Amino acid sequence: MIAYSSRCLAALCLMLAWCGQGAPASAPPVRVVVSFSILDDIVRRIGGSEVVVTSLIGPDSDAHLFEPNPDQARLLAKAQLFVVNGLGFEGWLTRLTRSAQFGGVIVTATDGVAPITTTEPGETSPVPDPHAWQDPRNGIVYADNIARALASIDPAHADAYRQRFQKYKADLEGLDRHVRAELGAIPGERRRVITSHDAFAYYGKAYGVTFLAAEGLSTDSEPSAKSLAELIRQIRREGIKGARHSIPTPCRGQTGRPRPTSEWSNTTPPP
Ligand SMILES: [Zn+2]
């Protein structure tokens, strides 16, 4: 009887130990902060219910004009993973991570992307264009970096992150084929677009579209009268005509959905 009870107790202990070891379902979600809305979307696609994400820059804000505040530093201090675009997009990055005393993992989503460089008017040295997400193939690089980071922080769900990455990759490859086929039907000399902010170089390079912009890589200053006059001259010279369409640029807001900025800070981990 004693021996039987001991065996039962041992079995029970083993079961408890086994349940405690695995327990991915009851593990608290990985707390992620991202700089802006595109990264928010990718983290949600890859992380699923295993992550809680907050974007510092809301979907209706201009990322180029963003300045972090003390509340956002406190929010970042509690995060395990901070995902940024890189290529100079977050000029405030070091200031914020220092002020937050951030001790988690920072992932630069553009690691591995071949940057397009450009020399801004009035400047002498070229700078990388940060808008790399406009090419869906770069979106795959972003997602891969994010999936790897999540797997390293939360190895119990590494397979789930990898599987979601594969699905997302297939979706982006499908999108790339679709855009290529649609634009392929338009003669190359007619693939020209006038835009306010020079945010489409990666898209233009991927699909053979020429973008003419009044503003440069950033939106921190209004276009000068000289650059506007030059743009108008170029439009006339090249005989560009066409209907007006609004193309939202995520770095300037107008996309995504409103979301509380401290969504995950109020999340109670499951028992
Ligand atoms: Zn931009």
Image: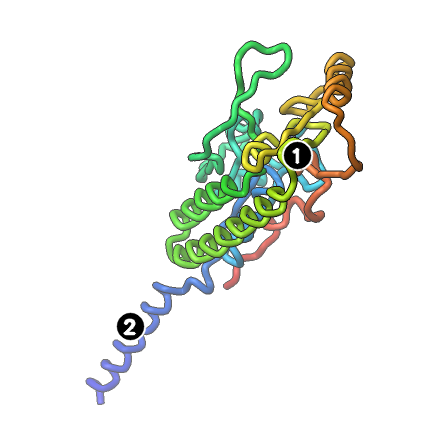
* 207 or 202: nearer the viewer: 207
Q: Secondary structure at mark 2?
A: helix
Disc 1 to disc 2: CB gap under 8 Å: no
Badge 1: residue crowd in 10 Å (few <14, some 14–19, many ≥20): some
Residue at 51% over, 49% down: 173
| Amino acid type assigned to the residue bearing label 1 in the image | Arg
Image coords of residue 185 (percent x, y): 63, 44
Residue at 42% over, 54% down: 162
Residue at 56% over, 40% down: 34
Residue 80 visible somewhere in the drawing:
no
Residue 73 in the figure: left or right of residue 256: left
The mark that comes first in sequence, 1 or 2, is 2
Image coords of residue 123 (percent x, y): 59, 11
Image coords of residue 219 (percent x, y): 69, 25
The image quadrant of residue 166 is bottom left
Q: Secondary structure at mark 1?
A: loop
The image quadrant of residue 236 is top right
State the CA–CA distance, disc 1 to disc 2: 66 Å
> Is ligand 1 closer than 8 angstroms to the Cβ of mark 2?
no
| Amino acid type assigned to the residue bearing label 2 in the image | Leu
Q: Residue furthest bottom?
A: 1
Above or below — where is 1 with respect to 156? below
| Disc marking residue 191 | 1
| Disc marking residue 48 | none
Residue 210 in the figure: left or right of residue 32: right
Residue 229 visible somewhere in the drawing:
yes
Q: Which residue is mark 2?
A: 14
Badge 2: residue crowd in 10 Å (few <14, some 14–19, many ≥20): few
State the quadrant of the N terminus.
Answer: bottom left
